[in-house]
Image: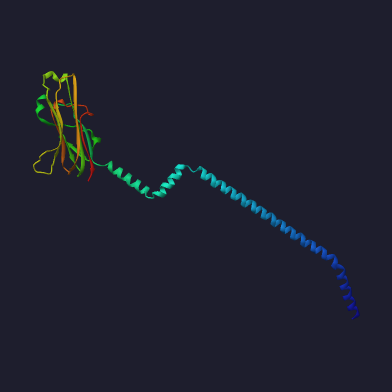
Amino acid sequence: MAANDYRAYLRNHIDMEEAPTRAPHTGSTHRALIFGTLAVMGLLQVASSVAILLHLTGYLREVDLASAQQSPNEEMHSETLIADPHKGLKEKKERCRTKKDLHMPSAHLPIKTPIHFSAKDRNELTIILWDDFQGPNLKKMKYHDGRLLVDETGYYYVYAKTCFRYAKEHDSGKEDVSNVQLFQYICHEKHTQSVITPISLTKSGGTLQWNISDYNMYCVEQGRGIQLNKGDGIFVRVSNAWLLDPAAEGTYFGAFKISN
């Protein structure tokens, strides 16, 4: 019993002697760990702040650069799209309409040469013959015996220009050209009728006195719109056809469809 009490006394005594030496060492370790942790956290916070600042600075610089590079035309284009969101649809319809117009019926023919009208035809109205070998100038229309024939019903604009010229070389037969009448008619034939009766659509011209100079010229140009049916024909006839100018740019005939 006494021995046990003596051993307990020795343990307590030893613990009391060692306690002062261990306590200071443990406190220093804890403080160092705390300071180290705080230091690391501070460094991480500083590094995070610097990274965020650099990121925001670079982003703002990119935004400013993109804004500076945007041209006024791009800004106007964006505003236009916002103001008119249907612009693309309108342009598409316009392109389709233009493409359709390229396939509308049309014709343009120059006078056929050589001209074989004689001076004795001066008091008669003569149908002009045209050069139908101008293939590209006939679209969805036909030509026969001086007439343009309609393949597609619609509202057309028809036109004609004829030039008459007189020079001394034409006076070999001593033809009298005083008070000469130079008239042009555009005529319409309805081929759907059992009896074809030409109708004059336009008339233009005048009475001239030539033989006062070596060379004389007089041109007549006219046109009008008219509703034509499939199978109808239009043609041009003139007085004094022997005086017609054979130049393609001076005497020609044509038509084109405007609408249905």
- Is 39 positioned to the left or the right of 208 in the image? right
Q: How many marks are shown on the rendered structure?
A: 0
Question: Residue at 43% of width from left, 44% of height from top?
Answer: 76
Position of residue 153 measured from the top left corner of the image (x, y, whole percent): 19, 44
Closer-to-camera residue (73/106): 73
Position of residue 169 measured from the top left corner of the image (x, y, whole percent): 16, 19
Position of residue 238 measured from the top left corner of the image (x, y, whole percent): 14, 31
Position of residue 170 measured from the top left corner of the image (x, y, whole percent): 15, 20
Question: Residue at 77% of width from left, 59% of height from top?
Answer: 32
Which quadrant would the N terminus be assigned to in this image? bottom right
Closer-to-camera residue (11/39): 39
- Is 100 positioned to the left or the right of 119 in the image? right
Question: Residue at 51% of width from left, 45% of height from top?
Answer: 67
Q: Residue furthest bottom?
A: 1
- Is 62 positioned to the left or the right of 193 in the image? right
Q: Is residue 121 visible?
A: no
Q: How is the image coloured?
A: rainbow
Question: Residue at 54% of width from left, 44% of height from top?
Answer: 65
Q: Is residue 76 visible?
A: yes
Q: Quadrant of residue 130?
A: top left
Q: Quadrant of residue 217?
A: top left
- Is 199 positioned to the left or the right of 135 in the image? left
